[in-house]
Image (cartoon, rainbow, N blue to C red):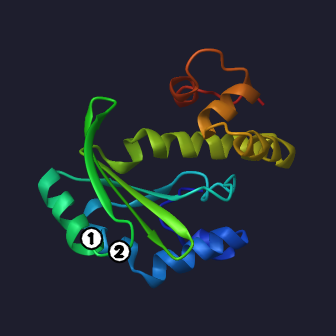
Amino acid sequence: MTFDNIEYLKNGSERQRAAYRTLTANSIFERLQLFSPLLTGTIPINIDIDESDLDIICYWEKKDEFANTLRREFGQVHGFSLTEQVINNYETVLASFCLDEFEIEIFGQNQPTKEQDSFRHMVIEYQILTARGEGFRQEIIKLKKDGFKTEPAFGRLLGLERNPYEELLNYKLTE
C-alpha cells in the first residue's frame, strides 16, 4: 500500500467509503492538486473512532500562495479556520472545516508530503497493523476510545518507553 491516492477507500470500511464520497464529491484533492495532497491519519489505516477527522497533508513552496488557496477554496465552508504555527521546526499552515459528517484538517509545510511525519507515522503504523493482525488493531482502537492519541497507543502496545512519536519513526518490525 503506497497511499498515493484515495482509490483504496472505495472498497474499505463504511467510514472509509463515506470519506471517499465526501472527498470526491467536494473535489478536495483536485482543489489542492498544486500542493501534492495526501490523506493521512487513522481513517486510511482503519483504526479510526467516531471523533476521527480526515487529515490531508500538503507541500507548499510559497506559504502565502498555499494559505490564499485554502481561503479561496474553503473559506466559505462551515467552521473554516486557518492558523499558522511552527511544528517540528517547520512553518505550518493549518486549515480546518466541516463537510458532511467529517471534520477535515489540511496541514501544509514546506516539506514534501511523503517526508512529513504524519505520512511516515501512518506508513509505519500500517506495516505494524499488517504484521500484528486484527487483535492488535482492535487493541489500538480500544486505547483510542479510552482517550489515547494514535502514536501513544502504538507506543503502549509496542513497549516504547520514551517518546512514541519519535520512536515510531525508527521502529523496525522484528516479526
Q: CA distance from mark 1 to mark 2?
A: 6 Å
Name the outermost residue toward the bottom. 25
Query: Considering only vertical position in the picture, is 85 above or below 100?
Result: above
In this orientation, which residue lies closer to the viewer: 133 or 146? 146
10 Å neighbourhood of mark 1: few (<14), some, or many (≥20)? some
Circles 1 and 2: CB atoms closer than 8 Å: yes
Whole-percent x, y for residue 173 in the image: 69, 30
Specify few, some or many for label 2: CA neighbours under 10 Å numbering under 14, 14-19, or 20 or more. few
Depth order, front residue of 125/91: 91
Residue under label 2, please give it. 77
Residue placed furthest toward the right? 135
Q: Toward the viewer: 115 or 140?
A: 140
> Which residue carries the number 1 mark?
75
State left or right for residue 34 relative to residue 143.
left
Residue name at image x 65 percent, y 47 percent: 126
As helix, strand or loop, the secondary structure at mark 2 comes to loop
Could you tell me which quadrant the C terminus lies in? Answer: top right
Amino acid under disc 2 = Val
- Residue 62 seen in the figure: no
